[in-house]
Amino acid sequence: MLWNHWWSLVCELRSACARTRTFLWMTLCLAGMSVRKDLLGVTSIVRALGLEPACYDRLLDFFHSPALDLDKLTRAWCALLFRLDPGILRVNGRPVLVGDGIKVAKAGRKMPAVKKLHQESASNNKAEYIFGHSCQAVAVLTQALSSVLALPLACRIHEGTVFSNRDQRTLLDKMILLLGSLGLQQPFYFVADAYYASGKVVRGLLAQGNHLVTRVKSNSVAFFPAAPPPPHRPRRRRRPAKYGKKIEVSTLLKETGRLQQAPSPVYGEKDVILRFRTADLLWRPGGILVRFVVVLHPLRGAILLMSTDLTLPPLDIIRIYGLRFKIEVSCKQALRLLGAYAYHFWMAAMTPLRRVSGNQYLHRKSEAYRDAVRRKIAAYHRHIQLGLIAQGLLQILSATKPTLVWQSFGSWIRTIRPGLAPSEQVVAIALRHTLPEFLATAAKTSILVKFIRDRLACPEPKEPPWRHETPTLTYRYSQVKIFRGESRVRRTVLLQLSRRSRTRQTPATRVSYPRC
């Protein structure tokens, strides 16, 4: 069963929880996020699993509880992925990580870290200014059949609150800290857009033995290495020259005779010939020698790429940067399908935000107020991280169990393209379709099933209006026959349980109402 593979993966995250009950609540949240149909906060988890109303407050307490260590959860999740290795894409033996920023609209006036944000996009579907949370996310590229997925690793809110005026960290510094919090024990390539083409990012990655692959702006400049002084000339009393002649990187395309041609290695492109040129030049923001690859696409125009690894072939630089957009697809799925950012946690004691507010400066607030803000932001991070893990579990099942996913799909889809892995939505539908069977049959093998079944909303059977005495029914069978307004999951589970109980009953114990 598909849920058994899902449960075996989740059990690897037990080390992040202080108690077994915390781990069971975490698993319940992951299951609810994977099968829910609507994205209306925590209540959608209660509805998706058919839980009793009291579980709503328990879930709120769970997201705010320090019993779930966020750093341990992130490291356990990354360790599980690299130990399982569901087709992780590697170049020169290094995994390829991609990073990007995401801005999530939030209109709450009592939600910490909400600020006015500017969105730069070529699409007119996005408003120019929104109120919301500014996050940064990291994912690892994974090969699933003939498709490539961006398997999410971590995401954090990196703007909106300033606890101390002495904190001068920028978004670039926080991205380096986020990469360090993953606990990866092997060097990697980090692929990002032109915003991360900065000396801070380059120095932070090189200090850990990692490399950056990015795009630079069209007006970027570089320098040729300075020529060594003639041996017969006496040395001057100054530091030897490091930078030579300055050159605009885009001018490398003007010498058309020195351009090379090759079939496009970009994902999804066929019968396209690229023209490119490679040059190793000094880049002043990083102060090191980097490799520039200027590419001329027949349809998309020119693009300037940069890599800090001088041994990386230019076609590999073009190929892995062409996969950077996969994290944008992954963030869209996490936002619109999984609801990883659909949290509605308010802080009652918070000072309401103004409509022109930017960062919230908390250095003049009391220590209790700052602790309350930290607690609320930690709840946001737990919700986001669990949503990303739920999405990653769907992608792992898609990459490792595609045949079982289609067997459990139980629905209809117009186009099934051979050779491509099932999408996250297909896996979610398959899990939703097989959830009642899992809850009805796996009670002896999974502690999670017992934990969920003990919390199903099961009202007491009512007395029939035409009888003064209570009919001799079995409890579960009466729930199924009388209460038909329950949720699909709860009704199906109780129906399967009642069928088992009826097979063991004698005909004399079955229900038979006399006519009135």
Image (cartoon, rainbow, N blue to C red):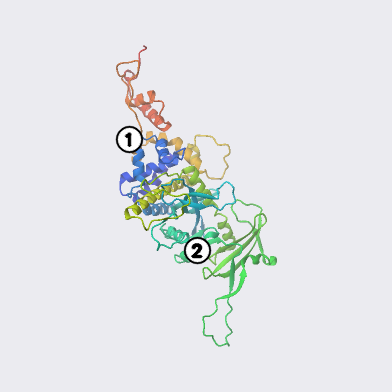
For the C terminus, give its image quadrant: top left
Q: Is residue 454 above or below residue 254?
A: above
Question: Camera-side residue: 217 or 68?
Answer: 217
- Give the Cα distance between marks 1 and 2: 50 Å
Using residue 217 as the reference point, say whether residue 349 is left or right of it: left
Q: Which residue is mark 2?
A: 211
Question: Camera-side residue: 264 or 481?
Answer: 481
For the N terminus, give its image quadrant: top left
User: Identity of the amino acid at label 1?
Assistant: Asp
Which mark, residue 318?
none
State yes or no: discs 1 and 2 in contact (Cβ < 8 Å): no
For image coordinates 51% across by 47% down, the residue present is: 332
Sequence-first tag of 1 and 2:
2
Using residue 304 as the reference point, say whether residue 25 is left or right of it: left
Question: Camera-side residue: 303 or 350?
Answer: 350
Indicate the position of residue 283 as horizontal and vertical percent values: 55, 69
Q: Is residue 239 above or below residue 360?
A: below
Assign a secondary structure to mark 2: strand
Q: Which residue is mark 1?
A: 454
User: Identity of the amino acid at label 2?
Assistant: His
Specify whether residue 446 is in view: no
Using residue 183 as the reference point, say whether residue 281 is left or right of it: right
Q: In the rendered picture of this protein, how many numbered marks are placed on residues?
A: 2
For image coordinates 41% across by 35% down, the residue present is: 47
Indicate the position of residue 161 as horizontal and vertical percent values: 42, 55
Indicate the position of residue 125 as horizontal and vertical percent values: 57, 46
Assign a secondary structure to mark 1: loop
Indicate the position of residue 181 as horizontal and vertical percent values: 41, 58
For image coordinates 64% across by 52% down, the residue present is: 270
